[in-house]
Image (spheres, rainbow, N blue to C red):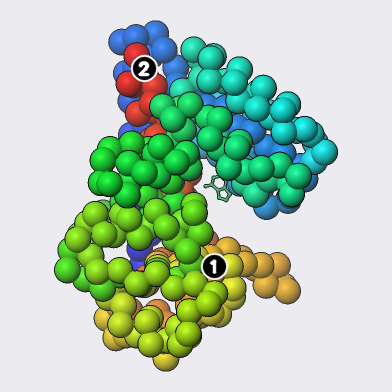
Amino acid sequence: MEILDGKKLANAIHEEVAQSVLTLKHESGRVPGLAVILVGEDPASHVYVGMKRKACEKAKIYSIVHEMPEDISQEAILNTIEMMNNNPNIDGILVQVPLPAHIDQTTILEAIAPHKDVDGFHPFNMGRLVLGLDGFVPCTPLGVMRLLAAYGIDPKGKNAVIVGASNIVGKPMASLFLNAHATIDVCHIHTQNLKAHTLNADILVVGVGKRNLITADMVKEGAVVIDIGINKTPEGKIVGDVDFDAVAPKCSYITPVPGGVGPMTIAMLLENTLISAQKRA
Ligand code: GUN
């Protein structure tokens, strides 16, 4: 069993991005810029946005966080997005989700200019991903693919099973695996007999936010297991969706939580922002 060390790979990508930022600045005088919109007081969202801001700082990417109160109007958010769409110093716009219930998430995400949509959540970029065309790809599933590639794991011809069918993880993950010529199962809350699916997985990707959802009896010997879940135990420890201690001995490769997919998500955000700036320069 080998650990898929997302933290180490992400650190290497951060350094590469920082180098490319310097080159871009030298050649064009431009510094990549990321605008983040954060609505409300969700503690997890504040932690994630704080991590994104710090990572930008380290890579010398300019970042600005627009913090807005929980009761902000949809129009005010749309106005801010419009300003960022038209701001020549901004290459990437990211709206942290979830948004409060009175805000229509689709309307907000569709307002982001697709060429600044570094999260890849806009229907334009999602559509291109499904069609196998280039465009911005959501950072978490993109990070999974990069992590697999770094360890020489090729999904081609493999059974890739995804547990969780969200717009930001499960659905784009399925498209990426299909584009990489894997056979895919996408499981979700209404899936009957989850274990029948997971036992068939050469590559198992889990991201639902339920501690110990995946136990050792659900995993095939030699599988690659990718854990995207983030859960807090009553003792305050961060754990994934996979019962790591019991499952790890059966795996060929497995991601830890923390230190697996999480850091890769942020590394891909920096890379997407850099690419957007390079295209603009
Ligand atoms: N909420 C949870 N993950 C993400 C992410 O990757 N991007 C944004 N914008 N919101 C999120």
Q: Confirm or reject: label 1 Cβ below 8 Å from ligand 1.
A: no
Residue at 26%, 59% (x, y): give it: 178
Question: Which SS class for mark 2?
Answer: helix
Instruction: State the quadrant of the C terminus.
Output: top left
Image location of residue 3, percent across then percent down: 36, 67
User: Which mark, residue 280?
Assistant: 2
Q: Outermost residue, left direction?
A: 157
Q: Outermost residue, right direction?
A: 71
Instruction: Kindly identify the amino acid type of the residue bearing the numbered disc 1.
Output: Val
Question: In terms of image quadrants, where is residue 28?
Answer: top left
Residue at 36%, 44% (x, y): give it: 127
Image location of residue 129, percent across then percent down: 33, 45
**Label 2: how many Cα within 10 Å (few below 14, some 14–19, many 20+):** some
Instruction: Kindly identify the amino acid type of the residue bearing the numbered disc 2.
Output: Arg
Q: Number of numbered discs present?
A: 2
- Where is 201 relative to 139, above or below? below
Q: Which residue is mark 1?
A: 208
Question: In terms of image quadrants, where is residue 204?
Answer: bottom left
